[in-house]
Structure formats: structure tokens, C-alpha cells
Amino acid sequence: MEIDAGKHALYEQFARIGKTLGTPLRLVLLDLLAQTERSVDDLAATAQATVGNTSAQLQALRQAGLVATRREGNRIYYRLAGDDVLSLLTTLTRVAEQHNAEAERAAGAYLGDLDSLEPIGREELVHRLDTAQAVLVDVRPEAEYTAGHLPGARSIPIDELAARLDELPAETEIVAYCRGPYCVYAPQAARLLRQHGRAARPLHGGWADWTLAGLPTEATPQPN
């Protein structure tokens, strides 16, 4: 028996989303847009891709309804179409790691041994911050921190961390977080801090999981 024509048309649209997500660069762009809206030039530079290719991938994401745009002068800014797009991206990547051995191996090769770093969960982090038992550091680029960050977090981008160790207390545990569960900055920060004799751990899930859980965030006021 053939599939009903109406059902086929419906599932064809569902499949369109899957096809759109079938390019690594598009997933990278969605991950970046989960932090803050960005221009094509900014996305291309951060993703280490050409402007032309980045623009083409963004157009595909827009046509599928996964990103939205706004114009400011001659510049177009892209953003996720909704929090459900981030939820989709997070589910996709975690399902891949849990059920695809190659994805699991690739994650391990990229992130290193996370278990040895003892990632801290959200509830434990909130308790430790409330009792002044931890200092929270956002190691994403400053622009991402400015757009939104965890309450009370300090901004020290990963490429500045080694030179700014003196800004962090020596006797308090440091919790580092970055973009999401597959962002390497927080594990790198925790390893660097440990090498310098500091107690340090990464936040499990990072910014992505925190925002999807609906927990409070802050943004840095922009100068007038």
C-alpha cells in the first residue's frame, strides 16, 4: 500500500528540515547563533569559512525557517528562529553521540576526557555560587558574554585566560562554561587552571543547556 499523498506531503516537509541540517557548517552556524545574533561577516570569521559559503548556508537555513533576519543599515543580522531550534540542535547532537559510535569517538577526540574534569551540574553550581564556594567564568568571546551570560559570571575569553590568572581567587573553585556541550573552551579552561594549581571544573552543558532549562541570564548594558 502506498503512503497517503497528504501524509507524504507532510513528511516531505519534515524531511526538508533534516536535509537542511545535513551540512556540518550549517550546524556550526546554528551553534554560533545560539549565543547571539550575528552578521554574515562575523559568522564567516568565527566559523573560519568564506563569506560566500557562509551566506549560502544561511540562506538555506532561512528558507527552511530555522533562522530569521533583521536589517540595520546595509548589514543583515541573523538569529535563531526560536528556542526550539536550539532544542532541535541539542537533541540532534546528543542523539548522534549516544547512538553513533563514530560520533562518540569524534566527541571524545575533540573534547578529551571530560569525566576526569568532573563537570558540575546546574543545581550544584547554583548552590555553590549561593554559598560563595565557587567563582563562575565565561570563557566565550566577549561579544557572546555581552549578549547574554549566566548571572554573576566573569568574562575571561579562553585566549586571554593564561594572562589573566591573577584576576581569579587562588583558594576558591573556579567553574568555567562556554557555548554548549560540544564547545571545547570550558574543558580547555579547566585543564589550564588545573595546570596552574587551581581547583577548576567545567559546567555540564554550558550556555545552551542553561538557557534551554529556562534559568535566569543577564546581559551587559550597551553604552548609549
Image (cartoon, rainbow, N blue to C red):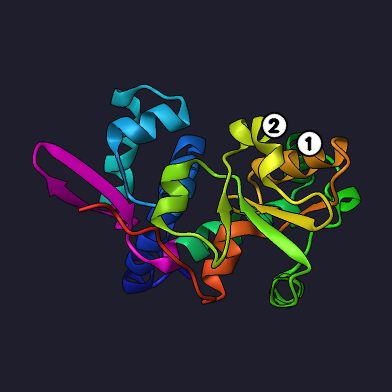
The answer to whether the residues at label 1 and label 2 have Cβ atoms under 8 Å apart is: yes
Indicate left or right for 97 with 154 as reference. right
The crowding category of the residue bearing disc 2, from other C-alpha atoms within 10 Å (few below 14, some 14 to 19, many at least 20), is some
Q: What stretch is highlighted in magenta?
A: 63-85
Instruction: Tell me which residue sits at (29%, 54%) in the image.
Output: 222
Q: Which amino acid does label 2 sit on?
A: Ala
Residue 65 belongs to the span the image colors magenta: yes
The residue carrying mark 1 is 192
User: Could you tell me which residue is drawn at 74 percent across and 71 percent down?
Assistant: 132
Q: State the residue at coordinates (84%, 55%).
A: 171
Q: Which of marks 1 and 2 is nearer the N terminus?
A: 2
Q: Relative to 87, does residue 180 appear above or below in the rendering?
A: above
What residue is pinned by disc 2? 162
Q: Position of residue 71 (x, y in %)?
A: 13, 47
Residue 193 lies, in percent from the top left, at 79, 41
Magenta run includes residue 47: no
Camera-side residue of 144 and 135: 135
Q: Which of 191 and 62 is in front in this view?
A: 191
On the image, the x and y values in percent for residue 134 come to 75, 63
